[in-house]
Every structure is written in structure tokens, then in C-alpha cells.
Image (tube, grey):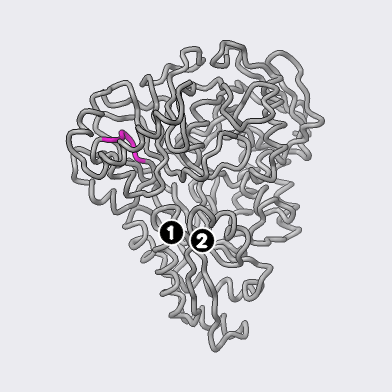
Amino acid sequence: MRRRSLLAGAFAVLLAATACGGAEGEQASADGTTLRYAAVGAPAATTHDPHGRVGNESDYLRFAMLYDVLTVTDDNGAVQPRLAESWEPDGDDLTRWTVSLRDDAVFSDGDPVTADDVLFSLERIQGKGAENNGRLSAFDLEASSVTGENTVELVTHQPYAEVGGALASLTFVVPEGSDDITEPVIGSGPFQLEEYDDTTAVLNRHDGWWGDAPGYDTLRISALPDPGARADAVASGQADIAGSVAPASAQQHEEDDSVQVVTRPGGVNYPLVMDLGTEPFDDPGVREAVKLALDREQLVETVFLGYGEPGADLLNPQEPFAPQAEPIERDLDRARELLEEAGHGDGVELTLHATNSYPGMEETATLAAEQLSEAGIDVSIEVGPPDTYWAQVWNVEPFYLNSLGGNGFVDFGRMALLADGPINETSWEDPDWDADFTEALATADEDERHALLADLQQRVADDGGYVVWGTGDGIDLAAPGVSGLPTGPGFHRLFIEQVEAAG
């Protein structure tokens, strides 16, 4: 395998051509079988372990193309088979599930993918729960077992009707025995790894993949932390796709026939996070005052430049069973009354932490602080570097900006809203809510279960610590001739094997 020196050179060429534009880009776009994707990623955070802590979108994209996953979500957020053909409960209590796997899946070395590989991978993911936010904490994998060459019986800790969703998108399957993944291991996905370094990975089509053949032969993923550089890479012809660019870049290219603007509705969500276990957010009146003091339409227009919708504090309004709720209207008078009732009639001082990992996060903090000041909430902003923000601020400070948009409400609730959830960043502790969440997941009837889940999401919106002021469109840029980019919610964006490359 050719590695670091060659690719370091390739990345330098990409940056140089991006700065200059012109002839280099035209020459590169003549390669019609290579799809070049400029993705969000910081080289310092690059990892090869798909089961541990993954901080780069570029790494998630690489893993989604190298490794099969059990299920995926579609354009509408519904769960669909992938490596798992079916998942059915054994009996009525919803604690034992038979997962049937495809019998034609093979790793890139030709070995078949077996139930042993799948159970090993799930156990490894669960063993790294401290790094991946307890992704599979719903399962009792010690009690689970392989029941056939292509069948696994999965046991859940409690009745769990949403097993298909729990197995979606990030259940990357590796060969049994792959204990130490400090270097890449083979996968059974639509592509196999050819070359890599910290900034670029080159993947070639895996002809043994069971699915429809990808629409291109080679995928080159470049990790670029700056959204402007990603947009410029497409505009200059050095990349075919730029993932998650700024709304300003979309506006710039709306009338430009040489660049396509592709939007993913509701793909961006930067909630203000308040820790209910810390003053003054332990007072419901203060939390409501913060929610009422924001001008959400102005935030959407300013931060997303209109590419989005004002929010009603729902964590996942794009979900098929999300409650229908109108955006929260600004009410400064009521916000001031609530603050006075909470003992902050003379105002309150807060520090809001933010970063610039994704386009618009820093702008959100600046405008939110201005709006909150009109209600008597004096906000100081501290902007942290992307490389350290998610380790030193996220789930540490009492008031900060998060970036959500991957997990569905059930998975997010299990990780972040149950009292003992591994990433309960808002200290949301409501025994009744926990009990009702358990009841919802034990409800076999889908319509009834979804109604219960909608109510649970609304209760968090009303009383919780997330201020979801709006959702913005995820925005990608693409070169002419590129088609089929995923536009569904959450991790649907990662599965790009059916994209057609420019020819």
C-alpha cells in the first residue's frame, strides 16, 4: 500500500490549486471515474478506529464507504436494511431479536462476512462506549449470541421496539479479532482503502460488494477544516463535492451554472445548551426567559441566510413522528418578568462558549448574546478552537453551543436525556420522563409508540435545557454532472456510493 509521502504531495497540490484556480482544476475534472469529496475534518483528529471517538466528518464518510453497517436511514428518516436483511422480535416482550444477515456479503479479501464478525463488532463498539457516547447501550451483548452462519440473537436490557434504529448507520462491521485498530483493517463496504494520510484517503471500488455498483471507480476524501476552502475547492475544479459549506457560499453560487447547491433540510442544529444542574439554569424561569428572549427568525436569517426554519426547541423536528409545534415567538416583556420572579430583576451575567467548527456557530453566539442583552441577560462569549472545544467545553461548561443532527430522537434520548445517560449534558433528570420513555419503547404498536415519543420530545422542548432556536439546511456544493447526493436527515448524508460522478 502506497501511503503518506504521495498523498501529502497530492494534498499540497489541492491547496495550491484552490488558491490559484484555473488550469489545474480543469485538468483534474477530466478524470470522470474519480469522485473527489472535500469533507469537514481536522488532520489532528484523524482516526482509523470506526468504533471509538470519531471527531471528523471526513473519517465518518470514509468508514461508511469501507465498512458495511447493519441498517441505514432513507431520505425520509425511516430505517432500511443494509447488511441486516431483517430484525424481528422473538415473542411479545421485545427483549430478544433475531437479526438475519445477508449471505452474500464478503470482505475485500474475499472472506465471507459472518454472524461472528457482526457480534464481535457490536461487542467492540459497546466496549468503547466511553468514547462513542454509549452507542449500543440498549443491548445486553453478554446475553446475545450467534445462532447461525448469518443470524444473531440480540438481547436488549429492556423491551426495545426501536432496534432497527439502534443498529443504523454507525454499526461498522470489521473482521472478528480486529482488536487493535490503530491502522486500517479491511471492510465489506462498497469501497476498499488504497492510500491514506492524515488529510486524504483514496478508496477504490470493491467489486465484491453485494449492492449495486457505485457510480464511480475511485473516491478521494480530503479533510479540510475551513468551509471556505471546501467551497473554493469545488469552485476551482479541485473537488467534485464540498460537504457542509457556509450559507454565504450557497448564496454566492445560486446563480452560478458551474456549481450546484444541494441542500439537506434540517441538517444543521446549533442549540444553546443550559445545564439544569447549575445556577441560574436550575431555575425554570431563567430557562424560559432565555428561550423567550431570542429572535429566532432573525437568527435564521442572519446565521443561515434564510436556508432554514425557526425552531420550537424540538431536538429533531425532521423526524417522521416529531410533534407539530409553532416556532417560539419572542416576548421580551415576559422574559424580563420571569427573570425578576427568579430574583434577577437587576439582570444576570452569563458566559456562552462557542467555536467555529461548523459554519455559523460563532455568528450564532454573537447574535444570541445581543438579543439576550435586551432582556437583561449580559452574555460574554468565549470562542474555543475546534481541536479542543469538543473535549474541553462540550459536556463540561454550563452554557455553550452544541452541533446536533446525526442521531434520531430515540437514540439521542437514550444517550442524553435519561438521568443516567452517558452524555446527559443538560442534567435532565425527570423520573416520570424516564418511565414514560421506557413505556414508549416497550410499546409494539408503531402509531401508539410514535405518539408517546412525540409527547416526550415536546416535554423536553418545554422544560429542558436545549434552546433549538432554528434548524438550518445542510449545504453541499457539487460540480456540474454530479448527481444523487444524499439529502435525507442525520447520517443519511454519509452513504454516497450511488452518487454519480462528473464524466
Asked if labels 1 and 2 touch by Cβ distance under 8 angstroms, the answer is yes
Does residue 248 appear to the left or right of 288 in the view shown? left
Q: Residue at x 56, y 44 (%)?
A: 407
In the picture, which quadrant includes the C terminus? top left
How much space separates mark 2 and mark 1, taking CA atoms? 7 Å
Rendering coords of residue 391 (x, y %): 59, 54
Give the residue at mark 1. Answer: 361
Q: Residue furthest front?
A: 5
**Magenta range:** 238-242
| Residue annotated with mark 2 | 401
Q: Residues within 10 Å of mark 1 (few under 14, many from 20)?
A: many
Residue name at image x 58 percent, y 71 percent: 287
Can residue 392 be seen in this snapshot?
A: yes
Q: Secondary structure at mark 2?
A: strand
Q: Is residue 64 above or below residue 432?
A: above
Q: Residue at x 62, y 65 (%)?
A: 463
Q: Residue at x 25, y 45 (%)?
A: 19
Q: Nearer the viewer, residue 465 or 363?
A: 363
Tell me where residue 163 appears, x and y as whole percent: 66, 34
Q: Who is closer to the viewer here, 490 or 384?
A: 384
Task: Provide the secondary structure element on which disc 1 rests.
Answer: helix
